Image: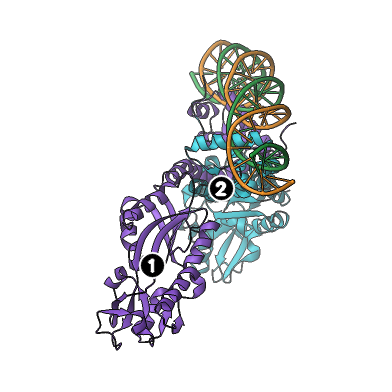
Chain colours: A purple, B cyan, C green, D orange
Amino acid sequence: MPREYQYPFELRHLVYFREVARRLHFRKAAEALAIAQPALSRQIAQLEAALGARLLNRSSRRVELTPAGAALVERIEPMLSALMRVPADVRAVAEGRVGRLRVAFTGLAMATVLPDILRGFHRGFPGIRLELNESPTTQQLAALHAGEIDCGFFHPDAPSPGIDTTLLLRERNGVLLPADHPLRSRDSLRLRDLAATPFVLFPRTHNPGFYDRILGAFAAAGVAPQIAEEVWPRSNGVGLVRAGIGATFACPSEARHLPEKVVFRRLAGPAPESRLVVGWRSAQPVPPALAALLEAAAAHAAP
Amino acid sequence: MPREYQYPFELRHLVYFREVARRLHFRKAAEALAIAQPALSRQIAQLEAALGARLLNRSSRRVELTPAGAALVERIEPMLSALMRVPADVRAVAEGRVGRLRVAFTGLAMATVLPDILRGFHRGFPGIRLELNESPTTQQLAALHAGEIDCGFFHPDAPSPGIDTTLLLRERNGVLLPADHPLRSRDSLRLRDLAATPFVLFPRTHNPGFYDRILGAFAAAGVAPQIAEEVWPRSNGVGLVRAGIGATFACPSEARHLPEKVVFRRLAGPAPESRLVVGWRSAQPVPPALAALLEAAAAHAAP
DNA sequence: TACCAGTGATGCCCAGGGAGTATCAATATC
DNA sequence: GATATTGATACTCCCTGGGCATCACTGGTA
């Protein structure tokens, strides 16, 4: 059975025709195309038949474009020159020299290891455009599965099937307090010392596992947690602490760059633990640009 | 000898790949393309080899685009949809339904038959864009030979090889005088009556033959011509007459739409004769849009 | 656990058609 | 009018796209 899906023409016809239209001379065009003149004549005739229009007026001494031929040249010229660049472009993407990476992250990632990772990555892959979006752990996992992002920096609760991860940070939390908090002078606190202090947390839906482990830490300390606000993104939570609304949990690593009027204090006794990983869809092979970013991240991996 | 000029791929590869990329399923894509699945697999493999990049990750249960494949889809999608429209567009141009006509004309043409011709033509061929430029006879002939215009309305001196013409107007000239000219009250003049009146002519280079026939008319009348100005385009010449600078020659047909303060008078005795033709490159066949314009012009042909 | 359904890839063959060579008809040029 | 050069045509060869049959692999299921 012959094929049903017929193309009116092939790229070959267009390239051949362009050459004839440029030179207005079959023999010279054929030479430039490194084919014999009769083959060229036939291909042009085919193209004319396919389009149902005469493209060239040829007397045996002169070849000239018809209006239809001129219209065709005008339309295909930009396409052909664009198509010439396609193979190189595609290969560049395949080799990771250019492209884009869609990266999601949490506030903690940006406050700790992410800037260094991105700096190192961008030095090695200047052609890769990074699309960075802060988003909660649960959304990152959904986006990874849906193929909407290439990797995410988030706080895992349980292993996710189909997602590979590398652990970057694992730290016992301390707390951030307003600088005028009554307990600001104490170097180390216990959770039960903060029984009367309202806490600013993230919405539970953003990471139910971690949220519940925080509540577990309160329970272990024998304290009923006072949740003042559930706020997102993270920077707003720190802003509320700064405004004196309450306290929040934070990693020691995060404490290096705190705004004014916010202080970090270690927690003795029960405390939640933060884990930061970079995660990506399990795939063989990992695209080169992503592989490079993951490698840069692995250089900051937790011991 | 095998061909030297190798295309990295053909349109077929791109259309096939687009279908697979849309459906992410070889069998369904093959069905949509009305080919068998193995043929499709091979064409995709060829495309990947040609580009030197893997475009699809296929496990035996799932097909997904690699970044390179996504980049390729992005680039070819607009081209393919544009290419789909090309055959219809080219055919429309070939049939004269759309396109453009580059038309040159002289002031006399625009002052007489051209507006009617264009009006009639545009009614029949609304898709044709007319590019109209006033230009002198000699320039029109050069532009016709160079293929820079499709037809011209001009004043021929001798037949031009390679240019076909249709005579549209053939009239003995009269003169345009300023309304305050001493001879304004005479209904009919002779050239020798105007021996003292300066004349406004066009530059000789714009039509040497006609220019010399004008001088011949002066000679036949036994008058030495007073050339006040050589000016172009024609409308400026009429403007100078209106300003009282001098007189100029004009056709009776032209006299129907004169500005204020300019009057037309017939000439008895020796007088130049104006011939207006429409001319186009001899070609078989004449493009349909041009043919339609020529037909509209022929309807106004001189008897 | 073994089977089954369904995936894309591979092997093999046929034929359509693209390209080659030889040649023709037509037309400028001398 | 002889000659050279143009694009078109006739004929042949063989490359390659497409067909069918089948394989290897995977995931769900009885």
Location of residue A107 in the rendering, given as x and y in whole percent from the top left corner: 39, 69
Q: Secondary structure at mark 1?
A: strand
Residue drawn at 72 percent across, 57 percent down:
B123
- Tag of residue A274: 1
Chain bearing tag 1 is: A
Q: Secondary structure at mark 2?
A: strand
Q: Is residue A293 left or right of residue A2?
A: left
Separation of marks 2 and 1 at Cα, in angstroms:
34 Å
Please tell me in which quadrant of the rendered image residue C13 appears: top right
Above-or-below relation of A78 to B110: above
Chain bearing tag 2 is: B
Q: Residues within 10 Å of mark 1 (few under 14, many from 20)?
A: many
- Tag of residue B280: none
Do the residues at discs 2 and 1 belong to one chain? no
Residue B110 in sight here:
yes
Residue drawn at 41 percent across, 58 percent down:
A278
Location of residue B177 in the rendering, given as x and y in whole percent from the top left corner: 56, 65
Front residue of B63/B226: it is B63
Residue B280 in sight here:
no
Count of marks, rendered view: 2
Image depth: mark 2 or mark 1 in front: 1
Amino acid type, label 2: Glu
Q: Is residue A180 left or right of residue B3?
A: left
- Tag of residue B64: 2
Residue drawn at 60 percent across, 60 percent down:
B189
Amino acid type, label 1: Ser
Location of residue A31 in the rendering, given as x and y in whole percent from the top left corner: 49, 26
Above-or-below relation of C1 to B85: above
Residue drawn at 31 percent across, 76 percent down:
A267
Front residue of B277/A220: it is A220
